[in-house]
């Protein structure tokens, strides 16, 4: 039986609406529905990689592309002062949606260590 589609796969396929801020052949980016900062964007590959655990050397270029999209979006959103990128991996890492995604957070003072 085919595995159930994640909510992010449904956003990629246009089945669920999202505030999409970037789209290209390899990834899309959209605003988080429950933002943890004034800017909170999710950057996800079109390829359904469940988590970083599931990434392979074949994904090297794709992962680099995602990071550069995060960078470009941060500058586009005016986060010149800095921003935070988060990649939660696995249940123990706080991951809830099992389609790999980078969080881009900014426009508030971000403290360390995170919770
Ligand atoms: P995770 O905990 O897996 O790293 O992050 C999942 C993120 O996806 C959460 O920040 C959550 O608010 C966001 N999210 C979950 N469902 C939806 C949705 O349907 N639309 C959007 N835009 N974001 C979602």
Image (cartoon, rainbow, N blue to C red):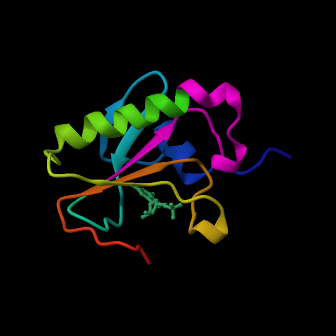
| Quadrant in which the C terminus appears | bottom left
The single residue placed furthest to the front in the displayed view is 112
* 40 relative position to 76: left or right: right
- x 36%, y 61%: residue: 33
Residue 94 x/y as whole percent: 56, 69
For the image, the number of numbered tags is 0
The image quadrant that residue 96 belongs to is bottom right
Is residue 5 among what the camera can see?
no
* 66 relative position to 56: left or right: left
The single residue placed furthest to the right in the displayed view is 1
Tell which of 12 and 91 is nearer to you. Answer: 91
- x 30%, y 47%: residue: 19
Residue 107 x/y as whole percent: 17, 59
* 50 relative position to 110: left or right: right
Residue 4 x/y as whole percent: 71, 51
Is residue 87 among what the camera can see?
yes
Tell which of 98 and 89 is nearer to you. Answer: 89
Q: Is residue 45 magenta?
A: yes
Q: Is residue 95 magenta?
A: no
- x 67%, y 39%: residue: 55
Q: Is residue 68 above or below residue 104?
A: above
Residue 72 x/y as whole percent: 27, 33
Which residue range is magenta in the image?
41-61
The image quadrant that residue 84 belongs to is bottom left
């Amino acid at each position: 039986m085919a595995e159930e589609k994640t909510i992010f796969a449904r956003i990629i396929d246009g089945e669920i609406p999202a505030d999409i801020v970037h789209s290209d052949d390899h990834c899309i980016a959209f605003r988080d529905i429950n933002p943890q900062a004034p800017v909170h964007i999710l950057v996800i590959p079109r390829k359904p990689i469940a988590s970083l655990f599931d990434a392979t050397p074949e994904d090297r270029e794709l992962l680099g592309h995602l990071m550069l999209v995060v960078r470009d979006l941060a500058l586009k959103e005016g986060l010149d002062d800095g921003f935070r990128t988060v990649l939660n991996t696995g249940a123990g890492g706080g991951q809830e949606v099992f389609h790999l995604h980078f969080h881009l957070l900014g426009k508030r003072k971000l403290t360390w260590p995170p919770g």
